Amino acid sequence: MTRLLIELLGFLAACLTTVSFLPQAWLIWKTRSAKGVSLGMYCVFVTGVGCWLIYGFLIGAWPLIIANAITFALSGMILVMKLRFG
């Protein structure tokens, strides 16, 4: 596999996994209900993404930083809405 295809695959993976939080965030915002969302899972997940973000900064990997910054923001919003809307 060429380096370009590998980079494109990584970019696609980062985009898809990051964007996957939009439907959940939108549904919680729209219904003002997060009853089906696991508080424990989102606490652990947001912490893990925060660690990936710090790791990305430490090694200077901008694709990792950008993808995890967006994922951290979206999953953090879901966590806040879970705490607010239950």
Image (tube, grey):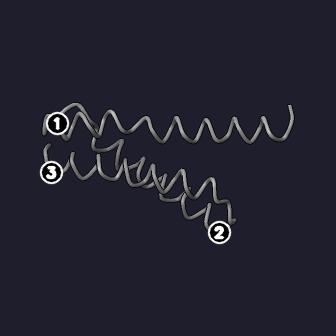
Quadrant of res 36: top left
Labels 1 and 3: the sequence-earlier one: 1
| Up-down relation of residue 77 to residue 57 (above or below) | above
Which residue occupies 35% across, 50% down? 43
Three-letter residue code for mark 1 = Lys
Q: Badge 3: how crowded within 10 Å, few (<14), some, or many (20+)?
A: few
Which residue occupies 37% across, 48% down? 74
Q: Badge 2: how crowded within 10 Å, few (<14), some, or many (20+)?
A: few
What is the spatial separation of the Cα atoms under label 1 and label 3, in whole angstroms? Answer: 13 Å
Q: Badge 1: how crowded within 10 Å, few (<14), some, or many (20+)?
A: few
The residue where tag 2 is placed is 58
Q: Quadrant of the N terminus?
A: top right
Q: Is residue 55 left or right of residue 68?
A: right
Residue 30 circle label: 1
| Residue 59: percent from left, percent from top | 69, 65
Residue 50 circle label: none
What is the spatial separation of the Cα atoms under label 2 and label 3, in whole angstroms? Answer: 33 Å
Q: What secondary structure is found at the residue carrying circle 1?
A: helix
Q: Is residue 17 left or right of residue 59?
A: left
Q: What secondary structure is found at the residue carrying circle 2?
A: helix
For the image, the number of numbered tags is: 3
| Residue 54: percent from left, percent from top | 56, 64
Three-letter residue code for mark 3 = Arg
Q: What secondary structure is found at the residue carrying circle 3?
A: helix
The residue where tag 3 is placed is 84
| Residue 37: percent from left, percent from top | 26, 35
